[in-house]
């Protein structure tokens, strides 16, 4: 069973995925994103508490990516453990998302002078 903890920030929302992902979780994640899109356009998906993902998780990430594209959202995946990182690479899902090694690296993308310069140019 998947549990998702949300951390709200002015610039982005962090989703911490905890547990395991199955086919029913896609609807839950889509519902959460639709609710949160009105608050921000930037999302960080932290997989630091997931040691294993299967094809259901890969398909969910592909569907969520399409939802993000349709709503002009920026989505980052971070803190991938070895098995999830390998699954995303095998199915080339890692090419859809910006991948960061740590949650701090992902947060730094939306904070600071470098991001503001990109945003306003």
Image (tube, rainbow, N blue to C red):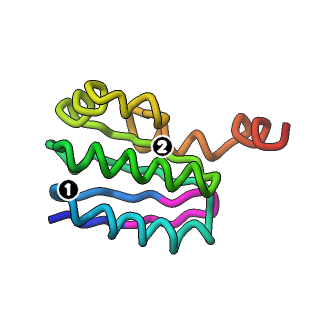
SS at mark 2 in the image: strand
Q: Quadrant of the N terminus?
A: bottom left
| 53 in magenta | no
Residue that badge 1 annotates: 21
Name the one closer to the observer, 61 or 113. Answer: 61
Residue neighbourhood size for the residue with mark 1, other residues' Cα within 10 Å, grouped as few (<14), some (14–19), many (≥20): many
Q: Number of labelled discs?
A: 2
Image location of residue 12, percent across then percent down? 57, 57
Horizontal side of residue 54 vs 8, given as left or right: left
Q: Is residue 118 above or below residue 19?
A: above
SS at mark 1 in the image: loop
Q: Residue at x 62, y 63 (%)?
A: 40
Pointers 1 and 2 in contact (CB under 8 A)? Answer: no
Image location of residue 103, percent across then percent down? 41, 44
Q: Is residue 116 above or below residue 86?
A: below
Magenta stretch bounds: 6-13
Residue that badge 2 annotates: 76
Q: Quadrant of residue 29?
A: bottom left
Sequence-wise first label, 1 or 2: 1
CA distance separating discs 1 and 2: 18 Å
Residue neighbourhood size for the residue with mark 2, other residues' Cα within 10 Å, grouped as few (<14), some (14–19), many (≥20): many
Name the one closer to the observer, 15 or 67. Answer: 67
| 12 in magenta | yes
């Amino acid at each position: 069973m998947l549990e998702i903890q949300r951390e709200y920030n002015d610039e982005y929302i962090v989703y911490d995925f905890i547990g395991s992902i199955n086919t029913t979780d896609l609807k839950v994640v889509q519902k959460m994103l639709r609710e949160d899109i009105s608050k921000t356009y930037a999302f960080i998906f932290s997989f630091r508490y997931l040691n294993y993902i299967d094809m259901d998780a890969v398909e969910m990430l592909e569907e969520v990516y399409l939802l993000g594209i349709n709503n002009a959202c920026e989505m980052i995946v971070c803190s991938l453990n070895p098995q999830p990182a390998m699954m995303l690479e095998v199915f080339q899902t890692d090419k859809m998302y910006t991948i960061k090694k740590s949650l701090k690296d992902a947060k730094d993308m939306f904070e600071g002078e470098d991001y503001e310069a990109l945003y306003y140019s």
